[in-house]
Image (cartoon, rainbow, N blue to C red):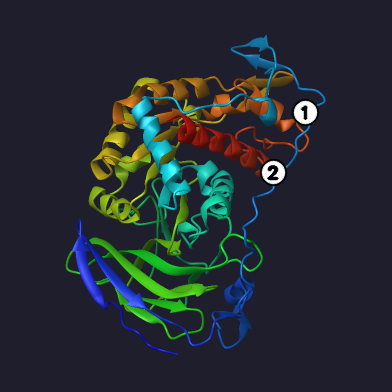
Amino acid sequence: MHFYLAPFLIFSFIGATFWVASQHEEHLELPEQTCKQAKSNGLDYSTAIPSPSPAPDPLPFPNLPEVEPAKKIPTIYKAGRRIRPPRAYIPYDLPLQPFEGAPVDIGKIGQAMRDLERGARIRMSFFGASHTGGDYWTGHIRRILQARYGDIGHGFTMPVPMYRSARAHDINLCASEGWTKDYVGYQDGHDDAYYGLGMAASSSNPEHFTWLETTHQNPIGRNFDTLDLFLLAQPNAGTVLAQIDRNEPIIIPTESVETELMQTRIEVLEGSHRLTLTPAGDGEIRLFGVSVENTGPGVLVDAIGIRGREARTWLRWDTEIFNSAIESLNPDIVVLAYGTNEANSIDYTMEQYARDLRRVLSKLREAQPDKACILVGPSDRGKSYKKGFAVWERTSLVADVQREVAPEFGCVFWDWHQAMGGDGSMIAWRYTDPPLAAADLIHHTSAGYAHIAERFMEALDDAAVNY
């Protein structure tokens, strides 16, 4: 075992500090302790298990559940009047839902996809609300793209869950209770704007911990060789202890004269690993997230989402820290998948929404002026009404605003609502076998998210071939 003090290399960019540390283990083995054991008894890495076997080669494509049509679709209403159920709603029967926008803007997406075919390395960063925060549709997209072009890591994730249902595909996450959590609208966190890319977790208690670990059985997510930790450097801040597997921790002080983003890169031998983060107890640490990566060609897919959030929450994120963080990620394609909660906010006028969306996209373009950009509209939605169900009418209004505003900022628009079959499709999807819609008629089941991911992939492939 070796003991390393970070930083080894220090340089600055865009108001941020970047540190690099390397740690190459003598033994490739993982701590045996499970998440449940650690939460009950505290960390104990005295015993180990062998690293899992390598991932299969080639990587398999994800399963896509077969879907049978609904035997009967309940009565559907819109604006108080009965309407016909959607004629086409089974994913296999729906036509291509392409990206909408200027050919040059769609062409940026197509070029990134063609670059992948030629062995490039690209990153897609998805921001959004619960659809994205659950990493179901983004997780399926990640599995498809990495099976095609190479698994180069999970991408950006927050190892401390912001809420109970937060999760991620193809990576194992664990955290103790007690972390202070921050995102716009959460009442128990700090009263400042230091959200990084939308969320943060803080603690000064050395008993608190969080970890992320490669998968043991899933074919995707079996290894990594690089970790980028995104932290807040600030006056009187504490020290982070970053432990790879069962090795001695790397010491990362986050105290700084200036308040700024601090990125620490940890390089390890490619393989199965667990990264454990704990406060040293000498002051508060604040974590914005970790990017889990492998070197080489392939695709990174970041799923950066918080349930119940709207695009306008971006306006409350500290601009300098956000700019530094997204510049560090350096995505080739940025996806904003908001709209469901804007449609839910009945006092939020479309004029206000259009104004706020323009401000959000201005903030994005200040940080990433030339990157490909996709606005993903809200999914269809239903609600109980009389003896049947009704369409949520604001959904199409929100989609129309996105369709109008996107090209003003060099972005394209993808209509999730139409990709499902349009008005009433969420209700129809609830009655398929298996159900593709959840009981709340707002979210999808895991099968539904897999199918909507396939629909999005069709648009990516269309851009690659035709633009």
Residue at which label 1 appears: 69
Give the residue type that dot 1 points to. Pro
Q: Residues within 10 Å of mark 2 (few under 14, many from 20)?
A: few
Q: State if disc 1 and disc 2 touch (CB < 8 Å).
A: no
Residue at 59 percent across and 47 percent down: it is 140
> How far is disc 2 from disc 1 in space, using C-alphas?
16 Å
> Is residue 414 placed above or below 364 in the rendered structure?
above
Q: Secondary structure at mark 1?
A: loop
Residue at which label 2 appears: 64
Residue at the outermost left position: 257
Left/right placement of residue 320 relative to residue 420 reads left
Residue at 43 percent across and 62 percent down: it is 296
> Is residue 83 placed above or below 408 in the rendered structure?
above
Left/right placement of residue 361 relative to residue 121 reads left
Residue at 54 percent across and 82 percent down: it is 28
Residue 349 visible at all: no
Give the residue type that dot 2 points to. Leu
The image position of residue 143, as x and y in percent, is: 58, 51
Left/right placement of residue 9 relative to residue 1 reads left
Picture quadrant where residue 260 is located = bottom left
The image position of residue 196, as x and y in percent, is: 33, 54
Q: Residues within 10 Å of mark 1 (few under 14, many from 20)?
A: some
The image position of residue 35, as x and y in percent, is: 60, 71
Picture quadrant where residue 370 is located = top left
Residue at 54 percent across and 42 percent down: it is 131
Q: Which quadrant of the figure contains the N terminus?
A: bottom left
